[in-house]
Image (cartoon, rainbow, N blue to C red):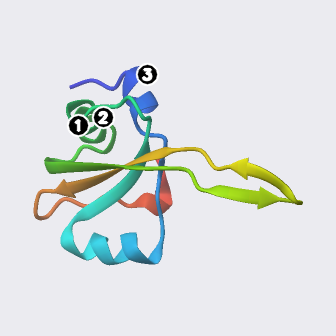
């Protein structure tokens, strides 16, 4: 499978938090993806960009919070997260990038 520009569009950025670091012990990696991305598109993008085998993709939509910035009410953007489970033995090193 060759890498196309569409694959780069389907993976916005990795999400690096304490919780996602704990998930990495179970061969899982978390990415921020576009709201319109489907599970099959995410799977194809991760497999072609990182040269790994994906066994499962779970997605969730996180609604943006309403917050105040300098006294003015505003709203954070909605994001979609993809939790990608990799085959045993496959690893994605997020720190090195693409």
- Considering only order in the chain, which callout, 3 or 2, is on the residue closer to the N terminus? 3
Q: Residue at x 56, y 50 (%)?
A: 64
Q: Hey, which residue is sitting farthest right in the picture?
A: 70
**Rendered view: 38 above or below 88:** above
**CA separation in Å, label 2 and label 3:** 10 Å
Give the x, y percent position of residue 40: 20, 32
Does the CB distance between marks 3 and 1 fall below 8 Å? no
Give the x, y percent position of residue 23: 29, 72
Q: Which image quadrant for residue 88? A: bottom left
Label 2: which secondary element: helix
Give the x, y percent position of residue 83: 29, 55
Judging by the rendered image, the residue that carries numbered circle 2 is: 45
**Rendered view: 51 above or below 14:** above
Q: Nearer the viewer, residue 43 or 71?
A: 71
Give the x, y percent position of residue 60: 33, 50
Q: Residue at x 33, y 38 (%)?
A: 49
Front position among marks 3 and 1: 1
**CA separation in Å, label 3 and label 1:** 17 Å
Judging by the rendered image, the residue that carries numbered circle 3 is: 5
Horizontal side of 20 relative to 63 (left or right) equals left
């Amino acid at each position: 499978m060759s890498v196309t520009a569409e694959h780069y569009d389907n993976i916005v950025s990795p999400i690096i938090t304490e919780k996602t670091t704990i998930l990495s012990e179970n061969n899982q990696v978390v990415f921020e993806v576009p709201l319109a991305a489907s599970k099959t598109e995410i799977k194809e993008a991760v497999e072609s960009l990182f040269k790994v085998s994906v066994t499962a993709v779970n997605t969730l939509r996180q609604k943006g919070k309403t917050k105040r910035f300098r006294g003015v009410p505003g709203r954070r953007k909605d994001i979609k997260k993809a939790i990608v489970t990799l085959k045993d033995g496959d690893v994605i090193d997020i720190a090195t990038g693409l």
